[in-house]
Image (cartoon, grey):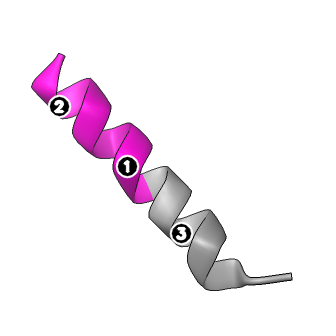
Amino acid sequence: MDLEQDEDDDVMRAIALSIK
């Protein structure tokens, strides 16, 4: 259980949406 990984996923999603 790594909360950091969850945060990374959220960040990656936000970046992907921003690029889109």
Q: CA distance from mark 3 to mark 1?
A: 9 Å
Q: Which residues are magenta?
A: 11-20
**Residue 11, horizontal then vertical, whole percent:** 38, 56
Question: In the drawing, does residue 15 fall left or right of residue 13?
Answer: left
Instruction: Answer with mark 3 or mark 2, whichever residue precedes in sequence.
Output: 3
Residue designated by label 3 = 7
Residue at the spot 53% in from the left edge and 69% down from the top edge: 7
Q: Residues within 10 Å of mark 2 (few under 14, many from 20)?
A: few
Find residue 13 and report its horizontal and vertical position in percent.
42, 40
In the image, residue 4 lies at what x, y percent?
Answer: 58, 82
Label ID, residue 4: none
Please check the rendered image and state whether residue 15 is part of the magenta-colored stretch, yes or no.
yes
Q: Residue 1, position in %: x, y?
A: 86, 82
Query: Nearer the observer, disc 2 or disc 1?
Result: 1
State how many labels appear.
3
Q: Residue at image x 33%, y 42%?
A: 14
* Residue topped by disc 2: 18
